[in-house]
Image (cartoon, helix red, strand yellow):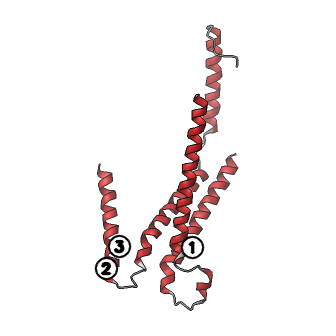
Amino acid sequence: MKHIVKIISLLVAISALWIGLLQTSLISPDYPLMLPVYLVVSLGCYGLLMVGVGLMQFPTCPQESMLLQQDIIEAKTFLRQKGVDIGSN
Amino acid sequence: MDLADRVIGFLLSCISLSIFTYYTFWVIILPFVDSDHFIHKYFLPQGYAILIPVFAGVALLSFLCIFIGFVMLKSKKKKA
């Protein structure tokens, strides 16, 4: 609940800044009209960058996978000794 | 597989950073440069700065819809 209040206040602040820029006509009026498109594009770039970084440092743990495979083999042999049907392999 | 993933991630990061830098230059900095400066040769007119992202967004959205439709069709066929 607190998080959404933060996000909404950020959005309100950004839109107030944008409307202020539109109203003051300090610079040419069609220039601040680009800012929402720019924000959307930069959000997309941020998402793409986060996906790329996440792919680059994807956490793998090969030792844990080896331990897991050993555990699986152990459990299968144990169950087979007890006479449980667990498939062919 | 691991190396390929790493290369793809690096390429994605590079693409996104270059798009961000180019678009920032195009939209934020270029209106403050004189219109007869030589740097204007490397950028399209200002109108394309809206048109291209809108077209890209529409294309992405339609591609996503087509993909979801294909997946739903496939899952329905598997169930039947």
Q: Chain of mark 2?
A: A
Q: For mark 1, give the secondary structure.
A: helix
Give percent across and percent down for residue A16.
30, 70
Q: Residue at x 60, y 51 (%)?
A: A55
Give percent across and percent down for residue A31.
43, 80
Which mark is drawn over residue B22?
A: 1
Between B1 and B40, the one lying in front of the other is: B40
Q: The residue under label 2 is which amino acid type?
A: Gln
Have a look at marks 3 and 1 and say if they share a chain. Answer: no
Give percent across and percent down for residue B46.
52, 79
Residue A52 drawn above or below residue A38 = above
Q: How far separated are the C-alphas under marks 2 and 1?
A: 28 Å
Which mark is drawn over residue A18?
A: 3
Question: If the image is split into quadrants, where does the C terminus of chain B sit?
Answer: top right
Q: Residue at x 67, y 47 (%)?
A: B2
Disc 3 residue crowd, few under 14, some 14–19, many 20+, Cα 10 Å: some
Have a look at marks 3 and 2 and say if they share a chain. Answer: yes
Whichever of callouts 3 and 2 sits on the residue coming sooner in the sequence is: 3
Q: How far separated are the C-alphas under marks 3 and 1?
A: 22 Å
Give percent across and percent down for residue B27.
50, 76
Residue A63 drawn above or below residue B48 = above
Q: For mark 2, give the secondary structure.
A: helix
Disc 1 residue crowd, few under 14, some 14–19, many 20+, Cα 10 Å: few
Q: The residue under label 3 is which amino acid type?
A: Trp
Q: How far separated are the C-alphas under marks 3 and 2?
A: 9 Å
Which mark is drawn over residue A23?
A: 2
Furthest residue toward top:
A83
- Among the 4 quarters of the image, the one containing residue A10: bottom left
Q: The residue under label 1 is which amino acid type?
A: Tyr
Furthest residue toward bottom:
B36
